[in-house]
């Protein structure tokens, strides 16, 4: 039996894949614990989960209008860097209490990877999005240089200054929850293992009126994720209008957690604050979303093509990967109206090539193995690192520093 400590940011989309892997490791007889903000972790981790609390900055709210470089600057300067600094003491306490054989650090929970290297603990990276592999910043060398400088500062404060690798990529193991069929010829380091999506168990949801679905019509699922609740009112309204114009052959279920559509529903558009997304994907003909990696991956795992309207962060990268794979169409979030949305829907619903491409990605996802494959790679990491990891934990106590792993 090995011990695995998952270090995660307070972001549901990053916690869910880790939760699926953690559940698989538990099923195999290993011990699992978490380091993070308890609230977001508790539900996906399940009852009885061992959670070691970490602090986070008080205000993680992002100004809604940020796009492009401004959004990237906020992500690093005002979110990731302060988050690493705030979480680091809690991660160190978790290591002291749980004594993991392997620390599994989300790419956006930099406190995990930096603490692991300072204490000499074997570390694996959980890469819930392939955006970091895309080389998207290669055309912005000054931005890339700024990020590397920021990472160097974090390493000097929290990690082992003698190390030179990018802390977003463990030199031992990177678990990528995608496949090359979607990510394309990305610049993933050689220690990357493409495992495809890992789906966590979902808690019970509010009852859904399954009888509302008309089997004679295409069902479209519309979702902008939980992080974009305050941004999507206009877009969701235009989606609803586009679907109503196609009422004889199309219907839509709209995830509307912010009540932008005021709960307005009819026999063509059903707006609900929460929807059973995995179950609906089994009945859907298309998905309209913001190109969030989890939603895109879940849709393609069901062989469903998409219309994507990226808003910020990694979403433009995922949208580009999707369109390059041929499994969807990209539209502009800020400018798309019912005409543009409707035309894109007509294409993905009417052209069988999109569904064929989605199914090619689906086949690659299934072959990759998901949570079971990720768990097997982590077991291997624990087996190969047990000796050096135990020795490091004996010689290097939290708060005293310690040598980096050779």
Image: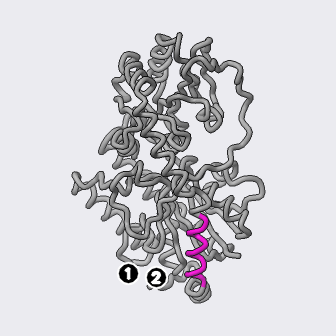
Q: Alpha-carbon distance for marks 1 and 2?
A: 8 Å
Q: Secondary structure at mark 1?
A: loop
Q: Kindly identify which residue carries mark 2.
A: 404
Q: Kindly identify which residue carries mark 1.
A: 162
Which quarter of the rendering shows the N terminus?
A: bottom right
Q: Secondary structure at mark 2?
A: loop
Q: Nearer the viewer, residue 397 or 343?
A: 343
Label 1 or label 2, whichever comes before in sequence order: 1
Q: Residue at x 63, y 55 (%)?
A: 20
317 relative position to 299: left or right: left
x and y percentages locating residue 58 in the rendered image: 54, 50
Asked if residue 84 can be seen in this view, the reply is: no
x and y percentages locating residue 167 in the rendered image: 42, 68
In the rendered structure, are the residues bearing label 1 and label 2 in contact, judged by CB atoms less than 8 Å apart?
yes
Magenta part of the chain:
375-386
Q: Is 89 placed above or below 393 here?
A: above
Q: For the residue carrying disc 1, how many other residues have a C-alpha within 10 Å: few (<14), some (14-19), or many (20+)? A: few
Q: Is residue 382 magenta?
A: yes
Asked if residue 232 can be seen in this view, the reply is: yes
155 relative position to 264: left or right: left
Quarter assignment of residue 277: top right
Report the number of discs: 2
Q: Residue at x 50, y 84 (%)?
A: 402
x and y percentages locating residue 116 in the rendered image: 52, 74
């Amino acid at each position: 039996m090995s011990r695995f400590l998952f270090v995660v940011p307070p972001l549901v989309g990053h916690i869910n894949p880790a939760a699926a892997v953690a559940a698989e490791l538990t099923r195999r007889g290993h011990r699992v614990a978490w380091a993070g903000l308890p609230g977001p972790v508790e539900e996906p981790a399940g009852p009885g989960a061992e959670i070691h609390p970490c602090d986070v900055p008080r205000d993680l709210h992002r100004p809604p209008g940020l796009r492009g470089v401004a959004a990237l600057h906020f992500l690093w300067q005002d979110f990731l860097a302060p988050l690493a600094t705030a979480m680091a003491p809690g991660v160190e306490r978790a290591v002291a209490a749980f004594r993991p054989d392997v620390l599994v650090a989300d790419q956006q929970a930099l406190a995990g990877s930096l603490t692991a290297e300072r204490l000499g603990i074997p570390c694996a990276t959980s890469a819930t999005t392939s955006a970091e592999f895309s080389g998207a910043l290669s055309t912005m060398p000054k931005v890339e240089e700024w990020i590397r400088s920021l990472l160097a500062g974090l390493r000097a404060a929290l990690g082992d200054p003698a190390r030179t690798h990018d802390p977003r990529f463990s030199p031992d193991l990177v678990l990528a929850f995608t496949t090359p069929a979607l990510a394309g010829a990305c610049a993933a380091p050689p220690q990357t293992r493409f495992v495809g999506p890992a789906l966590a168990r979902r808690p019970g949801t509010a009852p859904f009126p399954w009888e509302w679905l008309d089997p004679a019509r295409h069902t479209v699922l519309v979702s902008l994720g939980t992080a974009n609740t305050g941004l999507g009112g206009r877009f969701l309204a235009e989606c609803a209008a586009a679907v109503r114009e196609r009422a004889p052959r199309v219907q839509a279920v709209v995830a509307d957690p912010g009540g932008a559509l005021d709960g307005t529903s009819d026999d063509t558009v059903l707006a609900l604050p929460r929807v059973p997304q995995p179950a609906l994907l089994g009945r859907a003909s298309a998905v309209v979303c913001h190109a969030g990696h989890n939603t895109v991956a879940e849709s393609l795992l069901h062989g469903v093509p998409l219309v994507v309207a990226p808003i910020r962060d990694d979403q433009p990268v995922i949208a580009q990967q999707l369109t390059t794979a041929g499994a969807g169409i990209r539209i502009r979030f800020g400018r798309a109206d019912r005409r543009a949305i409707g035309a894109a829907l007509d294409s993905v619903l009417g052209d069988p090539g999109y569904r064929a491409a989605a199914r090619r990605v689906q086949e690659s996802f299934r072959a990759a193995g998901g949570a079971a494959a990720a768990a097997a790679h982590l077991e291997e990491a624990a087996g190969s690192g047990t000796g050096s990891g135990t020795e490091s934990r004996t010689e290097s106590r939290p708060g005293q520093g310690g040598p980096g792993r050779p």
